[in-house]
Image: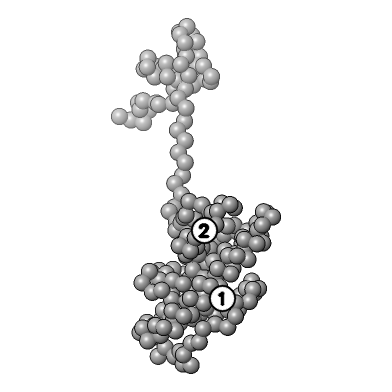
Amino acid sequence: MTPANKRRRTGCLSCRRRRVKCDERRPTCERCEAANILCAGFPQKRHVEPRQPMQDACSSKQPSEHSSSLAPLPGSPRPHQSPGPGARHILGYHYFLCRTLPLLFPREDIHFWRDVLCQEAWGSEYVQLTLTALGNLHRGVIMMTGPEEIAEQRGLAEKLNAVQQYTQALQELAGHMDEARDLPEILIGVLCLMAYFEVSPQLTISYGPPCDLPDSISVV
């Protein structure tokens, strides 16, 4: 079949049913008008939304300074809710993973901190507590920028909770230093995050001296 003899699919619905050539005048064609029949009009064009590329739910975009959403969690606690210790661990870990990490490290270095260190946290208490403390410290800072009247009070309470978790992380590390030395890469990563916690300009509450660590923490 030559291109000239190909059946056209752009005519009105009436002409296409009658298998006659349509002049395609809109909204009704002359062919139907001349035949004194009702022109059924033209089919609507299909509209297909382009598919968005799949991205990491946590690090697909940078969070805004005042964002407090905890993707991929369903939502943050409501103002009247006071999360318990278990909930605070979950909130701190996910906030660290989804909000704090992209602010601390460039995208090309995220693999170690997200896929190696965060994975190790599931089996190492001092790693888990360090991530949780840093995430909750960041979370407390963001909470203090909220519009609610009690935002500053809630933020300070969250920062105090972060300090308690950080103290627990130091205690766990001191009690398991021999095991920690067996994974020097993980230990160095945790010490870097602890340094971020110690020097954070947002840590404006006093938490007393940290627990005693061994005099030497060499990892080699």
The residue under the point 41% across, 74% down is 125
**How far from the left and from the top, in percent, is residue 133?**
52, 70
Judge whether 25 appears above or below 145 on screen. above
Q: Is residue 105 visible?
A: no
Q: In this view, does 95 lie to the left or right of 157?
A: left
Kind of residue at disc 2: Pro
Q: What distance separates the C-alpha of mark 1 from that of mark 2?
A: 22 Å
**How far from the left and from the top, in percent, is residue 137?**
57, 68
**How far from the left and from the top, in percent, is residue 120?**
38, 72
Kind of residue at disc 1: Phe
Q: Is residue 163 left or right of residue 177?
A: right
Q: How crowded is mark 2: few (under 14 residues within 10 Å), some or many (20 or more)?
A: some
Q: Identify the secondary structure beneath mark 1.
A: helix
Residue 7 position by quadrant: top left
Q: Is residue 149 visible?
A: yes
Judge whether 140 appears above or below 196 on screen. above
Judge whether 219 appears above or below 70 on screen. below
Judge whether 59 appears above or below 109 on screen. above
Q: Nearer the viewer, residue 18 or 118?
A: 118
* Badge number at residue 197: 1
Hey, which residue is sitting farthest left in the picture?
1
The residue under the point 48% across, 51% down is 74
Q: Identify the secondary structure beneath mark 2.
A: loop
Residue on which disc 2 sits: 83
Q: Quadrant of the N terminus?
A: top left
**Given contact means CB atoms under 8 Å apart, are the residues at marks 1 and 2 in contact?**
no
Q: Residues within 10 Å of mark 1 (few under 14, many from 20)?
A: many
Hey, which residue is sitting farthest top in the picture?
36
* Badge number at residue 37: none
